[in-house]
Image (spheres, coloured by chain):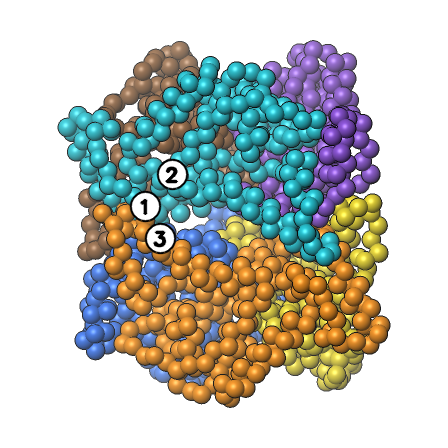
Chain colours: A purple, B cyan, C brown, D orange, E blue, F yellow
């Protein structure tokens, strides 16, 4: 995975910040060549038993991505790095919302530079250098952290849910979710702060 | 809702026309702070009974958006306005097709200006002033109104259905739908008008 | 269909290459006016029997698009052509990932030029002339053909599956699929070639 | 609908109590012959416009069943009646959990007597006479009414949801639902009553 | 398949009539031992290529069952036969609506006699001898054939659709389907026949 | 859970064997009164934070049932016991395939005796005494254990998958699954044993 993002900026000095947590990404396929080498060694008395063990490994591998969205707190990905190289295809399609691009990347495994990652919406911003990127990532983290954790973490749960369901299903779940969440003290705190002309960062919300 | 679109153009003189009716928007979450104040007052003998009443309110609130897509006629949103302001977060993510943008807007609740709304595909066009926008919106309405209502309203029903289903499901429903709709007189009228070199606006279709 | 793509470049000398096989396209509706003329002649003793036969025709018509994605090999669409003309609307919305554009195209049936097709992600590239386009299409075909057919065709099956399912469903299916596919000899061949500093095109994979 | 249940006991003196609210019933089709007569008169300038109005009527008709499950309170159906008769098919399949029976009833439209309705699980009980049935229905209503409305009505919402979703989806929704509902005072009341050796009917729960 | 049904009555003189076309049957698994022998011989240069060809065979094999439900006319299965025997497991679970039975049959592959097939709802009726069974099957076919083909075949399409969708989805599809189907002449014919005291078999419906 | 099954046979000397692993059971609701007492003590600074912790507990609680189906080996439940008693409702609906029974049990929380548990398909068999039940459970375990683990465990994975998906989805997944599984040596072993007139228990399959 790190490998994969590194590739994005491999031949340039650009840097990217990705906010993950939702979005139909990382789902299109598996880099047969790179990941495959791990599976070549899999044990098993016959094809079926090897297959059983391969599935177990794939599910574990998939779980390393799933934790990013199971974590109720937003995850900010600040990526800096160059291509590690290699003679064969590596890149996996990450771009469900742009079908023609998904297809092209999947079948050609060509490299993608930072500017294209930005223009296609894969990363939200590209920076001039690592320091600016890290500063921006930390600023973003601080900003999000200043808000109600009930609002922030509840939003992430619902964003992930909405991505995997139709609009009416997403609305129905959100209604059930907010039956309790809209009874939070944070709404009153926030309203009060607003009357007192306080900024969000001056409000202290209880931990979640 | 009006609030929310107003924000789009708050610090500028730009104006936007949005054609709604389909598109995975308005689904990601609820603006806890703004809407929450309505829910703070909810009645109920205990947490569960308050929750029951909150759900009723949320479903009513969601219904105000659902009517836009239940209405079989296309709805054109011509938005002009400035930011009303306020010390706390308001904006909700509206942009499912651009995951990284959805995430950023959801968690930061930052403002979005008209140019970004246009470049991200949230609104279809931005205008120099209110008059141009309103004229354009009316022109669009007139153009759509000149077409077969069987085609226009049937398309809206199928657009909304397709958004909430997989491609094969969308195709199956469209086939059932058109079993009757393709028996409309409008096809013959339209073909005839074409032979007689008439423009769409010269054809009179029966009301639906 | 050919009609429809022709329209894209009708008033210009631009050319487009589309890689199909996945992507929520071609699903939004049917061009009532153009296709309708075929259905006007449909036989049947009453409305229900005509409807039954219309459905059969629609399903056959839909199948002509479905074969593009049922074919396990990637399909490259190189489109060159001018508008055939006609006095009434033809173009159907093809652009699910850009809701506001889908809506506008569906309800106005306006023409779309090659540059807009490119900027909206409908086509992956636009070329200066037909020769450049054809050369690029063939180069792309050759490049894809040089890769492991197990990887390429398996990726297409999974891309189409993922488009029609939620992310967790897509991951589950991909895991089942790769229980056998990751036992391919192609991984070893590819790794060996990499050690020997060969390019992908120097590896010969068995036919699938 | 009344028609349909009446048929169940047409040639006997048996009576049935059905608890509705969930269960895949009433979904398989429409009695073309009986209901059809209503639709024969539908207005509309052409086939498509008639179709549009027919759909509106069907949706209204379906809504008369949907209200039974939208109503958060359990609905008890106490059915007593004889067959009205008629020369053409009326009965529609109501029995999704018994596929071979669903098929037979759908295609033959044969009558179903009370004993078969009971043995197939369509009705929960059959009684010797109308008075026993009505008494039993009221007893059941009184028993249900003595329980926590938070538990009873919440269960109905979740039963209907579970019927239309997979097991994991049903569990996820139930978890969101109970975030607030398990904070009800009714649990404490019920526990206290249990310690004091009271029966459920001696507890007074607040209205919902 | 024939094998499988034969087993049902293997040690008895009982006979069964099954009405297929809908119902969650034939889906639980594959008889590894019996069907497996066909797959053992599959060709392919490596595990992945063999897997590719196995999948092709499975999909063909599944298609032999799918045709039963794709066929718009109801299919009556009249089964008579004795157990062919064999030293290893054969029976596959066919009984989704009775989970504990599905599980037991799947994991033990034990034989199921005709009476259990009837009591569990797998077959709709068991007969004393082959002649009675065949007569009953033909009577049933004649009865179904006397009804409106628009009603019968439309019902089958909707039964299959409803089995694979939630109740609200089934209702939505049925409404779209009947937009045209309720405009059939068969309703008027049937109503007229009813007024003239004719039986269904005296009405002649146009072919579908 | 144990509580719940104990209730089944509380006033009798009957005993039940349930084969779990698939089947739409345990999904309809939560026993508010019994389980609720655990949730009453939940910590949290406000309603929303308590709700967050309640959800965590519910998901953990649900997971204790999910492990039964995540475990790829079949689970046999041999239940013996009497009712522990209690003054308030405990039983939850466990019987999705019999809607009218599900509803009645959910809303009345009445007791269910062993015979009804058997006749409704909730348990597969009821025994005269504990020893017979345990012997039968062990015999069943031994019988299942004598079969190919590739067949048995693969069947369980597919049974659970099929329960949560439509028939076409179940078939598609089963085809992907068996791409590798039908390449198992167990098929050849089993065929050979059959030729040599061996019983299943005389074959030794490799561990999975």
Tell me which corner region of the image, top left, top right, bottom left or bottom right, holds residue E96: bottom right
- The spot of residue E132 in percent (x, y) is 36, 83
The residue closer to the viewer here, C133 or E81, is C133
Q: Residues within 10 Å of mark 3 (few under 14, many from 20)?
A: many
Tell me the distance, in whole angstroms, between the alpha carbons under discs 2 and 3. 16 Å
Q: Residue at x 65, y 42 (%)?
A: B38
Secondary structure type for disc 3: helix
Left or right side of C205 for D57:
left
Secondary structure type for disc 1: helix
- The spot of residue A192 in percent (x, y) is 76, 34
Q: Residue at x 35, y 41 (%)?
A: B154
Residue that numbered label 1 is attached to: B178
Mark 1 vs mark 3: in front: 3
Tell me which corner region of the image, top left, top right, bottom left or bottom right, holds residue C178: top right
The residue closer to the viewer here, E78 or A24, is A24
Residue that numbered label 2 is attached to: B73
- The spot of residue F164 in percent (x, y) is 58, 55
Q: Quadrant of the N terminus of chain B?
A: top right
Q: Residues within 10 Å of mark 1 (few under 14, many from 20)?
A: many
Mark 1 vs mark 2: in front: 2
Is there any visible trace of residue C31 in the rendered image?
A: yes
- The spot of residue A198 in percent (x, y) is 77, 26
Q: Residue at x 49, y 58 (%)?
A: E167
Tell me which corner region of the image, top left, top right, bottom left or bottom right, holds residue E22: bottom left
Q: Residues within 10 Å of mark 2 (few under 14, many from 20)?
A: some
Are the residues at dot 1 and dot 3 in contact (C-beta closer than 8 Å)?
A: no
């Amino acid at each position: 995975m790190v490998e994969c993002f590194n590739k994005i900026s491999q031949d340039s000095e650009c840097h990217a910040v990705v906010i993950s947590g939702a979005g139909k990404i990382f789902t299109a396929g598996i880099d047969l060549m790179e990941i495959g080498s791990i599976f070549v060694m899999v044990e098993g008395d016959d094809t079926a038993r090897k297959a059983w063990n391969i599935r177990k490994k794939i599910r574990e591998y998939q779980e390393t991505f799933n934790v990013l969205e199971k974590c109720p707190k937003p995850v900010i990905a600040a990526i800096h790095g160059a291509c590690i190289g290699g003679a064969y295809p590596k890149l996996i399609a990450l771009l469900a919302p742009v079908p023609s691009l998904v297809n092209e990347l999947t079948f050609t495994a060509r490299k993608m530079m930072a500017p294209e990652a930005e223009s296609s919406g894969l990363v939200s911003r590209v920076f001039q250098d690592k320091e600016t990127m890290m500063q921006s990532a930390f600023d973003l983290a601080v900003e999000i952290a200043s808000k109600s954790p009930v609002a922030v973490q509840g939003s992430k749960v619902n964003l992930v849910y909405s991505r995997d369901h139709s609009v009416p299903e997403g609305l129905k779940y959100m209604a059930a979710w907010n039956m309790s969440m809209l009874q939070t003290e944070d709404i009153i705190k926030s309203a009060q702060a607003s009357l007192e002309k306080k900024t969000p960062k001056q409000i202290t919300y209880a931990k979640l």
